[in-house]
Image (spheres, rainbow, N blue to C red):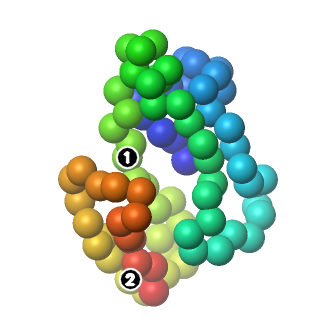
């Protein structure tokens, strides 16, 4: 998961990971916390791409919403 553009240059500052690599998660479970104000104040854009790298494991990848979203929005449906 990559949040924002070029934010990797922050070396994790302003981000707190809430899950471990390979951990099973549930729908709605928070994965990460980040400080929007600190990231934007540092000059980084928060546009976040959504890429399914293992799409061949699913019969369908349906995009439910595009553009500006909120925390409650469902973005993808994997079947």
Tell me the residue that label 2 is attached to. Answer: 60
User: Does residue 64 sit above or below 69 in this rendering?
Assistant: below
- The secondary element bearing badge 2 is classed as loop
Furthest residue toward top = 42
| Residue drawn 29% across the image and 72% down it | 64
In the image, is 49 to the left or to the right of 35? left
Image x and y of residue 22, in percent: 76, 61
State whether residue 6 appears in this view.
no
Image x and y of residue 34, in percent: 56, 36
| Residue drawn 45% across the image and 79% down it | 78
Image x and y of residue 39, in percent: 47, 23
Q: Residues within 10 Å of mark 2 (few under 14, many from 20)?
A: few
Q: Residues within 10 Å of mark 1 (few under 14, many from 20)?
A: few
The one of 57 and 51 positioned closer to us in this rendering: 51
The one of 31 and 48 positioned closer to us in this rendering: 31
Image x and y of residue 72, in percent: 40, 64
- The secondary element bearing badge 1 is classed as loop
């Amino acid at each position: 998961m990559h949040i924002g553009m070029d934010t990797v240059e922050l070396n994790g500052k302003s981000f707190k990971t809430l899950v471990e690599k390979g951990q099973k998660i549930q729908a709605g479970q928070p994965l990460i916390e980040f400080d929007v104000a600190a990231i934007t104040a540092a000059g980084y854009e928060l546009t976040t791409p959504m890429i399914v790298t293992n799409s061949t494991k699913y019969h369908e990848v349906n995009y439910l919403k595009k553009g500006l979203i909120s925390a409650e929005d469902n973005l993808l449906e994997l079947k």
